[in-house]
Amino acid sequence: MRITLAQTSPRLNRSNIDEVVSIIGSCKHESDLIVFGELSLNGYLLQDKLYEDAWEIDELDILKELSLDVDIVVGAAIRDGESFRNAALYFSKGKLLSKHYKVHLPNYGMFEEARYFKAGTIFESFVTQFGKISMVVCEDLWHKDVHEKLIKENPSYIVALVASPARGFSDSGIDIEDKWYEIIKTVAAECRAKLVFVNRVGFEDGLGFWGGSCIVNEDAKIVHKLPRYKKTVKTFETEENL
């Protein structure tokens, strides 16, 4: 299976879809699955811009069309009735195959997601041509109960969409990058699954995102990794036997 990690630097507007479409177009013949980061169609610090920039699912038909050639995972702010969701969307074979609404919305320090988004409630898996997949969004993975739910789902792949800044955790005294790698290695080993971790880069209002996207195998080994702080799109081959 060929997986493309799209470590992008989204802006705080809807024009991100143009770059997403361009990346998919350039990679679709060399890749089986292209994965973008959390809120890659919107940018992270949306706040009140959410009301004008959130997407309706029907506005993303171009991604459905492109998924006829390659499976696509993208992060987006989605309008869900009168609410807004921080969503991971999986497109395949011309349709939206699955979606995951972020369950654990941070609401501390510089984070205000719970103020603007409505939390999801479930973790589930779905069947693709590549095996069973579960999706999570960023802080979802920091909760042990989520690990337990993923183990029960028994996916072949876990796809984690992330927008992790390099600062904002000063009170915790932890090294955020080291902690992230510790978490995703643990989850991959617990679930005996490959884990695809895509974190964005770039700056928003002085807040920097560190990237370091990677693929972890079932033995908790990082087998492919992108650089820190650098916009990068790269395709990797993974073993098919799971």
Image (cartoon, grey):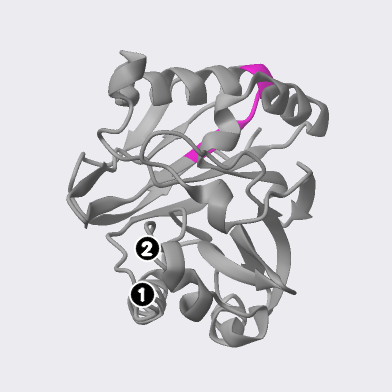
What is the crowding at mark 1: few (fewer than 14 residues within 10 Å), some, or many (at least 20)? some
Left or right, 182 with reference to 78: left
Q: Earlier in the sequence, mark 1 or mark 2?
A: 1
* Disc 2 target residue: 43
Query: Camera-side residue: 2 or 151?
Result: 151
| Picture disc at residue 16 | 1
Q: Which quadrant of the figure has residue 57?
A: bottom right
Query: In the figure, residue 233 lies in which quadrant?
Result: bottom left
Of the pair 184 and 27, the residue shown nearer to us: 184
Q: Residue furthest top?
A: 173
- Where are the magenta residues, as a range? 190-196
Question: In x, y percent, where is residue 207?
Answer: 23, 47
Q: Position of residue 102 (x, y in %)?
A: 63, 48
Q: Are marks 1 and 2 in contact (CB under 8 Å)?
A: yes
> Is residue 80 magenta-colored?
no
Q: Verify whether residue 194 appears in magenta.
A: yes
Residue visible at 41% across and 78% down?
Answer: 17
Instruction: Check disc 2 and give the amino acid type.
Output: Gly
Report the side of 62 relative to 235 (left or right).
right
